[in-house]
Image (tube, rainbow, N blue to C red):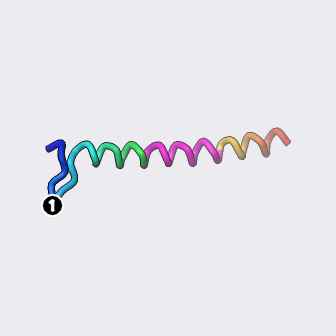
Amino acid sequence: MLKSRPDRYGAIAVSIRWLSAILIVGLLGSGFRAVNAMNAAA
């Protein structure tokens, strides 16, 4: 079930989706930490 079917996405598409979601959340967290570090240094 690696390939997508008309009624369901395949494992590769689902994996890419969740990986990108995790990366976006990680980037948001990293950005908030960077802003907090800059505020603490000022």
Left or right, 6 with reference to 20:
left
Q: Which residue occupies the foreground of this view, 14 or 42?
A: 14
The spot of residue 5 in percent (x, y) is 15, 54
The spot of residue 40 in percent (x, y) is 79, 42
Q: Residue at x 69, y 41 (%)?
A: 34
Q: Which residue occupies the foreground of this view, 22 or 12?
A: 12
Residue type at mark 1: give it. Asp
Left or right, 28 with reference to 11:
right
Classify 10 Å Cα crowding around label 1: few (below 14), some (14-19), many (20 and above): few
The residue that mark 1 highlights is: 7
The spot of residue 39 in percent (x, y) is 79, 45
| Element at label 1 | loop
Q: Residue 31 magenta-drawn?
A: yes
> What secondary structure is the stretch in magenta mostly built from?
helix
Left or right, 35 with reference to 13:
right
- In the image, farthest residue toward the bottom: 7
Q: Residue 4 magenta-drawn?
A: no
Q: Magenta stretch: give its range.
A: 21-32
Q: Residue at x 30, y 43 (%)?
A: 15
Q: Splitting the image into 4 quarters, where does residue 36 fall?
A: top right
The spot of residue 19 in percent (x, y) is 38, 43
Left or right, 31 with reference to 22:
right
Q: Quadrant of the C terminus?
A: top right
